Amino acid sequence: MKLTIGGETKNFKDDLTVAELLAEEKVQNPEYVTVAVNDEFVDGPLESRRVLVEGDHIEFLYFMGGGRPWPSPTNN
Amino acid sequence: MAFTDQQLERYSRHIILKEFGTKGQKKLMAAKALIVGAGGLGSPAAMYLAAAGVGTIGLADGDVVDLSNLQRQILHSTADVGKAKVESGAETIAALNPEVNVNLHRGPVKADNVLDLIAGYDFVLDGTDNFPAKFLINDACVLSQKPFSHAGIIRFQGQLTTYLPGQGPCYRCIFLKPPPPEAVPTCRQAGVIGAMAGVIGCLQALEAIKCLTGMGQPLTGALLVFDALTMDFRKIKVPSRPSCPVCGQNPTITEPQDYELAACDLKAP
Ligand SMILES: [Zn+2]
């Protein structure tokens, strides 16, 4: 199925959960990353088991401080 | 209030803007903006707000200028190393635009002083570099129903959002609570490209000017994320969280609270 992650559309296996997506995308310290699916926040362990469906768009929102960030996004 | 000839000349490029005009300039000259953190973000924000003729600018910071600040904190110069940032900042502002009234708040912003600090201002710019301060400013602004600009920068990235009371999510809606101090494993400074502070700090100044004059659409309900390596600006929609502990339906945070800083974030004596 196709999912749009941070504006980029990619292929994933069907029935992927939010937690599995975080692992697949190698998001570090996912407990400190806010996830939004289709412009709604996904909270806590319960919702992280939410199964994503074709066409979902997902955003990872990272803490940014001022040169002392935590955690750091993976794309570095 | 009539403009002097000098003011008409100084602000002429504002005044000829149809959306801005003498009306917008007058609003700015009567406005009071508080910048918390006279560092990377606060520097360009303070300078552009001063240049724009914002009537009163408050600078809140407890630090002194360090040589390692000068790579991005353009409010301060080499000769200012060792000087209080608020004093150095006030001198830069005075040189840029002596018409601006500058209030100096020297010292850390804490739960017991933040409400008094922001009370006198129309708009707050969060230019701090740590999460306890960011959550403190958010909570104080929500509790005081005060519009403010959140910004954060790191490495080659920056983020920005604007809180307007009752009109969209707050910072806590997005991030809920500060990461725990022990979650910072090495305390290694992550670094930031200096010009990033310029980009994001200027955007904060723009948001302040827009809100103070009523121009355009503020960045509410969205987190703007900028990546300097790809030059992508992305505006990510963010909703209000009905369960937000400070701005939600049943708030549990009813007064500002201090969070612990990671031990390594504390200044050496
Ligand atoms: Zn909120």
Image (cartoon, coloured by chain):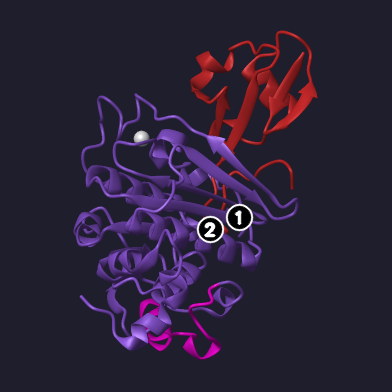
Chain colours: A red, B purple
Residue B208 image position (x, y, % from top left): 39, 58
Identify the residue at image location x=36%, y=54%: B211
Identify the residue at image location x=20%, y=58%: B119
> Numbered disc 2: what chain?
A
Residue B93 in view, yes or no: no
In the rendered view, tell whether residue B64 sits above or below residue B32: below
State which region is magenta. B73-96
Marks 2 and 1: in contact by CB < 8 Å?
A: yes
The amino acid sitting under disc 2 is Gly
In the rendered view, tell whether residue B118 sits above or below residue A18: below
Residue B21 image position (x, y, % from top left): 38, 66
In the rendered view, tell whether residue A72 sits above or below residue B82: above
- Viewport quadrant of the N terminus of chain B: bottom left
Nearest the eye: B21 or A51:
B21
Please name the residue that numbered disc 1 is placed on: B154
Residue B90 sits inside the magenta stretch: yes
- Neighbor class of circle 1 (other Cα within 10 Å; few <14, some 14-19, many 20+) is many
Numbered label attached to residue B266: none
Residue A6 image position (x, y, % from top left): 67, 33
Residue B246 image position (x, y, % from top left): 30, 35
